[in-house]
Structures are given as C-alpha cells and as structure tokens.
Image (spheres, rainbow, N blue to C red):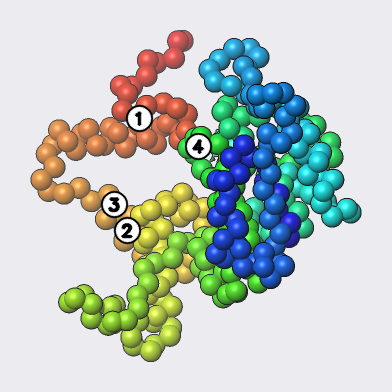
Amino acid sequence: MRIDVVTIFPEYLVPLGVSLLGKASERGVLHVHVHDLRAWTTDLHRTVDDTPYGGGPGMVMKPEPWWAALTAVTKAGPDATQPMLVVPTPSGRRFTQRDAQRLAGRPWLIFACGRYEGIDGRVAERARTTMPVEELSIGDYVLAGGEAATLVIVEAVTRLLPGVLGNADSVADDSFAPGTMSGLLEGPVYTKPADWDGMGVPPVLQSGNHAAIARWRRDQALRRTAGNRPDLIAGLDPADLDERDREVLADVGERDREVPAEVGERDREVLAEVGEREREVPGETGRDPNAPPADPPPP
Ligand code: JAH
C-alpha cells in the first residue's frame, strides 16, 4: 500500500516513519510519503488560507495550492493505480472498523490534512471527478487540524495489512472486528502473577474449563458493553443472543434502574421526570437536557 499525506505540518507525521509503521516501510509492505502543502504555493509569503466568503470566523484553505499538490502527488504515484482521497473533517461520515477494513483493501490512499475552518469546498468537488473521495470524522469533537485524525486512520488501516502488525489472531479478536463476540466490547484480561499484592485472578480463568471460560468472557463482554456502550446493545441482532445472554442483560438493566434507599421522595419525582423527558427527546437535537420543559407548540 502507498500512503501520501499533504499537510502544512509535515513534522506532525513523523510517527509514520518510526516503530511499527517504519518496520513495515523497511519490509516494503507500506510506502509513506509526507508532503508540505506550502511547496505548492507561488507567493512570497507561501499563503495557504484566506477569509471565508459569506463572512464568519476564521480562515479557509485556498484551493490553488491544494489542487496543485493533489495533481503533483497523483502523478508521482504508480500509474494505473487508483488513488483514494481521504479528508479527515468533523463534518465527515463517522470512521468505523468497517471503513478501516475497506481502506486496507485499497492500493493507494492520499490524506489531505486541513487546518483553520477547513479546505475550500471546490477541492473535494473537483477531486471527486477523478477519484473516490471520503470525508471522514473519527469522533464528535473538533481538532485544530486533520493531522492527528490522519495518524488515527493510518494506524487503524495499516495494522490490518499482512506484515505490519505481524499477528493475525489479535486482529481477528478485536472489539468491533467481525467474529463470535462481534458487536461487543472485550471484558477485562489478566496475566501472571496469580496473586498481585493481594489481588487474585477470577478462578474460572485458571480452571482449564474452556466452555466455562468462554461463557464467563461473554458475560463480562455483555456487562461492559451495557455499561459503557448502551448504543451497541441496542444494535445487537436478537438472533445472536442466547438465554444466558438475556439473563445477564436483564440483570445489568435492573441494577441500572435500582434507586438507592437514601434517595428521598422529591428526588425520585425529579429522576422519574428526567427519565420521561429523555424518552421524549431524541439524541443529538442540540437541546439542553437540563433545560426546563419547552413551551408547548402553538395550536
Ligand atoms: C479540525 C480541519 N473528527 C475528528 C476531526 C478531524 C478533523 C478535524 N477536527 C476533528 C479538523 C480543523 C480543521 C480538520
């Protein structure tokens, strides 16, 4: 796989040349090239940004250096190899393990790292006429630029390539990877010593009973997923849940709903009301969950 990265901060991408990825590069599995966008500016001040049309805060990256860079980088690569342009942006589709697997099957990825308020929209629009373009978000937060997100995506993708991680089994067992525990987070793991400063290891893991160990691990995975990622529980296929799975989930659900005895009558009323409101208001509407009830709509 070939990876090109275009950025105004090439030093930020130095990690791509060291450790795991550096070894893959040495082995010839992966070829990484980092480019300074300012190499494609033509003015004395090497300007890459300007004020936004329509007004508003901040600056927008100018299209000319970006188009010159993408044209040059595309020509520098192996011909007859289809590049894909990846643009990390908080406005993109959410990047998932499925995307990592799909991107790992491509021969050539070009990452465009924006800064400021982003890149002039005509760059992605024109690039789309010559190659697939993916605008991807690694999570619901805003960074100062696409460089850190590029490091995240490159690591998630390249560790799937044969000869990069060097351990096919640990890849197959990941949380989010397809397989027997697919859709669940992994539970806790343990190694020696069996007694660490008075803390033991769950006896079932030392029993040698492989069926019991598998069942215990699934219980832990279900409990951790219900606690940390209820959205993943909601997305499970009911056909993938056995009777014991349902018992474990019913148990964590009941514990969540238990109200400690020291909570008073007025507290219970408030908690019940908040619960009802949460069921009424869909997520991500931007509404403050602590705000008083909205005015009723006009008749
Ligand atoms: C911020 C250009 N989803 C993570 C992410 C990715 C990119 C950016 N922010 C967050 C970003 C400013 C300029 C890209």
- First in residue order: circle 3 vs circle 4: 4
Which of the labelled discs sits on residue 167, or is there none?
A: none
Q: Is residue 156 visible?
A: no
Residue 46: x and y in percent read 67, 27
**Disc number lying in front (1 or 2):** 1
* Mark 2, residue position: 252
* Vertical placement of residue 292 versus 37, above or below: above
- At label 2, counting other C-alpha atoms closer than 10 Å, the crowd grade (few under 14, some 14-19, many 20 or more) is some
State the quadrant of the N terminus: bottom right
- First in residue order: circle 1 vs circle 4: 4
Mark 1: which secondary structure? loop
Write down which quadrant ligand 1 falls in: top right
Mark 1 and mark 4: Cα distance apart in space = 25 Å
**Disc number lying in front (1 or 4):** 4
Q: Is residue 224 left or right of residue 168?
A: left
Q: Is residue 18 left or right of residue 130?
A: left
Tag 2 near tag 3, CB within 8 Å: yes
- At label 1, counting other C-alpha atoms closer than 10 Å, the crowd grade (few under 14, some 14-19, many 20 or more) is few
Which of the labelled discs sits on residue 256, or is there none?
A: 3
- First in residue order: circle 1 vs circle 2: 2
Q: Amino acid at mark 2?
A: Val
Q: Amino acid at mark 4?
A: Leu
